[in-house]
Every structure is written in C-alpha cells, then in structure tokens.
Amino acid sequence: MAISYSTRDIRWLVGASTLIPFVVLAFRAMDVVTSPKGGRDALTGLPSRAALLDIVDRYFATPGASTRTAACLVIDIDEFHSFNERWGRDAGDEVLRQTAQRLRSAVREDDMVVRLDADAYALFLAPSQGMTLDSILSIGDRIQRALSEPVVVHGTTAYVSASVGIALASKSPEPTAASLLVAAERAMVEARSHGAGALRLFSSEMQTEIRASHELAEDVAKALENGEIVAWFQPQVSTETGQVTGFEALARWEHPTRGTVSPAEFLPAIEATGRTERLSEVMLYQGLKALVAWERGGFAIPNIGVNFAGMELRNPHLIDKVKWELDRFGLTADRLAVEILESVISQTEDDIILRNISALGELGCGIDLDDFGTGHASISSIKQFRINRIKIDRSFVTHVDKDGEQQRMVAAILTMAQQLGLDALAEGVETIGEHSLLGQLGCHHVQGYGIARPMPFEDTFAWLESHNAKLAPPPRIERQQGH
Ligand code: C2E
Ligand code: CA
Ligand code: CA
C-alpha cells in the first residue's frame, strides 16, 4: 500500500525537524516547574488553567522573551454537548480523557497541555527561536487530525472534531498570559463560527474587535443604568378570537447616536460583563409597569412575557425579587410569563437554576418554553418544571402553510403539547397564510411580524386601539322601513 503525504503533512515534517533542538533548550532555560500550580484535573490528569497562566507569565517576564517564538492554542471539542446527550456521560468522559492523551502525545514534553473547562483545552508551545508560523500551523493541523481519529466508546466507534484557535505570543494584545489566552480563545471562537474542525490564527482585526467589544461593554453598562435600555413590546394574539392575549417584552438600546440597537448586538456584551441580572430587572420592571398602564388605559392584557436567560436564573434571590416587583405593582403572579429557553432546561444541571424555575412555577408565574424545537427538552423536565406553554420556534413556523414537512412537524409538536396539557404559541408568524393554518392546526396563540413588529411602549396604545377596532363587530345597519 502506498503511503501518501499531503502538503500539510510535509509542511509539518519540515517545520518540526527544524524546531526540535530549540524547543528543548529554550524551555529548559525557563526553569519549568514540575508540579503545576493549581493542581491537576481529576478526570484527565492534566494541569489546570492556573498552571498555564503561571508558565506563560514567566515567559513574558523572561528578559529577551521576544527573541523566541511562543504560541498558545485553544482546542475546543465541537458540539460536545450533543455528543454527551447522544452517547451518555460516561462516553463523554471517555472522550475527554482520550482527547487529553492524544493532545499530550501530539506535542513535545516541554509543551504544556492543560484542561481549560468542560470541553476545552489549551496548549502552550515552548518558546523557541526556530519556531515559525508554518510550524505552529502544522502543529494545529496535527492536533486536529489526532483528535479526529475514531474514539471507541462502549464498543462502538464515535467521531469528534475540534475547533482550534492559535495566538502567537508576539501578537498578544498585552504581554500577559491572560491576554494571550483570551486572544487564542477569540481565534477559537472565530474558527468555530466557520463550522466544525476549523483552525484560525489570532489577527490584528480580531484585536480591534476585542477592543471594540470592551468599549461596547462599558457603554452598555452605562446604558443600563441611565435608562437607554428599554423594553419594546410585541403582541401575542389568540387564533380563535383575535384578542390580544399578551405582549412579549424585548430589549432595545435607544442609543443617542446610533439609533435603536437590537439585542443581537448588545446582549453578548451584557452577558460577558455579567449584567444579565440587571437587564432582567430592568425588563421585569418595565414589563409590569406597562401591564398596569394598559389596564389604566382600558386595555385588559392578560400577561406580559419577560425573557430570563440562564445567568439571571442563577440568582438565589430571584424569587424574592420577582415577588417584590409583582407586589409593588399590585399584580398577581399569573400575569407574568417567564420565558425560558428550551436549551436552558435541557442542558442545565445547576441546582439553583432548577430550583428557581420550579419556584417561579409554584409562585404561579406562567413558564413559557422559548424557542421550542431547538433544544431537546425531555418530557419529564417539561413536567417537572410546570411548563405551561411552549413557544414553537420560528424555524418550524416559516412557510408552514406551504410546506408539508413543516406542517407535519408543527402538527406533531401540537399533538404532543395537547397530550401534555400545554398551551402553545407559534413565534415568527409573518403571513396571513401561516396565521390561519396555525389556527386550523390548533395552535392557540401567535406572535410575529404578521401581527405586529415589536414597538416602543408609547406606540402600543394606538396599535391596541386599531387592532381592537378591527375585532369589534361591524356596526349594525338598521333596515330602513317603508319604501
Ligand atoms: P426571542 O425571545 O426568541 O424573541 C423573538 C425574536 O424574534 C425577537 O427578536 C423578535 O423581534 C423576533 N421576531 C418576532 N416576530 C418575528 C417574525 O415574524 N419574523 C422574524 N424574522 N423575527 C421575528 P429580538 O427582539 O431581536 O430579540 C432577539 C433575542 O434576544 C430574543 O429572542 C431573546 O432571546 C433575546 N432577548 C431580547 N430581549 C431580551 C431580554 O430582555 N432578556 C434576555 N435575556 N434576552 C432577550
Ligand atoms: Ca422570548
Ligand atoms: Ca423565541
């Protein structure tokens, strides 16, 4: 059988052979400690993040460090969560162990491999004068190939792939370990966004993005405090009566110069700076306040939907806060529908989150399972959390009136909901055709651009006025007598 080498293999072989003597000499000179700081990870036996930070900081502190090339790689197993779900936790652990071994044997003894978190590893390539960009890229390639070899779990063969981000120490935004690691992580995120098994090198454009995102984070923190983040409202209507059954509160940033900024742009900054809790506080307050204002204006809106992300559900005082807010407005708990992503329910093992969701249900709040159909929640968890409504994700709703496959999916979801005694709302309803078919299929509520786009609070009154006018029975025309 002929052995063939790809150009990548050859590039690797050439690169590696030139780098060996330098690597050994250079790293020995750094006085590498044998017992790593931060202890070892129990599952894989690898050192931890702290050990890597320690070594890299020492590298930066060594006089003349810049004359020797060093690099940090972050390796993230693609869709590890799905793997775990499909094959079970033991199999997942086995993959993590084997990944650790494969990484260890893919690099030299002087290189440091650590486990960063659940399914991510980092590698610090020992500094060397002879190491080139090519040789570093080859190492990345080699690691990906090593990890894509089949893994045998419970006698079956499974496959995983990994996304790899690489940052050269010379390109680190700051000469610190933390900064280099962030850079490699950023490159990994970029790789992952290009699909499974990709590899990316940290670039100066990514550096600009990091700086911009820091600025954004600062701005958004201020915006949350000075009232620039506001709730916009999107109505939900009954497919039977056409009546408004609720509104969903959706966050908008009313930026002084940029105009209205959508959550896709600023939510990541809010999450990254740990301010989701503050956001939900602001949204809850504005949502409940709107409910009271509508009532005063003569509109009986049954409930308001507020989005709670995974992070704010971790707050041990969440229930007290929600109770307090409801009391402040004199509202009963059933007027609030807490929207929780299906993925949060299916993925979380965090006790506080689980207890908070149950407690919100016990308090009497509605629990809406958001983006239903995208997150694999089990039927037992739906029961356990007293979910009372599912929000069918837009991806199932689009063209439901024209596409048989979509129709079958939605019909199946609705049958399941009915059997479990759950209410259902379809999201992202854009056309009259979708709206009426969903009604025929037995979906009780709809929300989407076809009914109305999210709007500022001030506009809701005029919208309600005109919507209700359309619902009102046509004025009776008296039959004329005589003639
Ligand atoms: P979501 O909770 O699934 O909200 C529905 C999104 O779909 C909204 O986007 C809404 O404007 C959009 N939408 C509604 N109808 C249609 C339609 O007919 N067609 C299309 N194409 N889109 C439609 P938006 O407001 O940009 O929000 C995006 C996501 O940001 C939300 O998705 C939610 O996950 C998150 N989000 C928004 N506000 C908050 C908040 O206050 N807290 C948290 N934690 N997340 C929020
Ligand atoms: Ca939602
Ligand atoms: Ca949704």
Image (tube, rainbow, N blue to C red):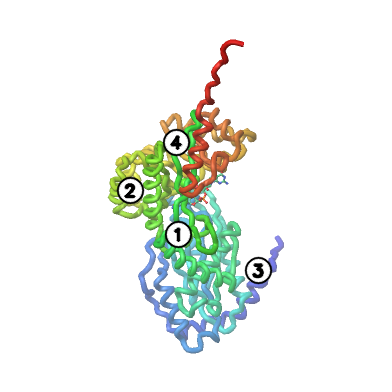
In space, the residues marked 3 and 2 are separated at their CA atoms by 52 Å
In space, the residues marked 1 and 2 are separated at their CA atoms by 29 Å
| Residue name at image x 71 percent, y 62 percent | 2
Q: Does any atom of ligand 2 lie closer than 8 Å to the CB of label 4? A: no
Counting residues from the start of the chain, the first of labels 1 and 4 encountered is 1
Q: Is residue 461 visible?
A: yes
In front: mark 3 or mark 2? 2
| Residue name at image x 33 percent, y 51 percent | 351
- The image shows residue 385 at horizontal and vertical percentages of 36, 41
Q: Secondary structure at mark 1?
A: loop
In space, the residues marked 3 and 4 are separated at their CA atoms by 62 Å
Residue with the mark numbered 4? 245
| Residue name at image x 48 percent, y 71 percent | 181
Q: Amino acid at mark 3?
A: Asp
Between residue 195 and residue 364, name the one nearer to us. 364
The numbered disc on residue 228 is 1
- The image shows residue 84 at horizontal and vertical percentages of 46, 50
The numbered disc on residue 356 is 2
Counting residues from the start of the chain, the first of labels 1 and 2 encountered is 1
Residue with the mark numbered 3? 9
Q: Is the residue marked by circle 1 packed among few (<14), some (14-19), or many (20+) residues within 10 Å?
A: some
- The image shows residue 368 at horizontal and vertical percentages of 42, 41
Query: Label 2 near label 3: C-beta < 8 Å?
Result: no
In space, the residues marked 3 and 1 are separated at their CA atoms by 54 Å
In space, the residues marked 2 and 4 are separated at their CA atoms by 25 Å
Counting residues from the start of the chain, the first of labels 2 and 4 encountered is 4
In front: mark 3 or mark 4? 4
Q: Amino acid at mark 1?
A: Glu
Q: Secondary structure at mark 4?
A: strand
Between residue 237 and residue 68, name the one nearer to us. 237
Q: Is the residue marked by circle 2 packed among few (<14), some (14-19), or many (20+) residues within 10 Å?
A: many
**255 versus 179 height, above or below:** above
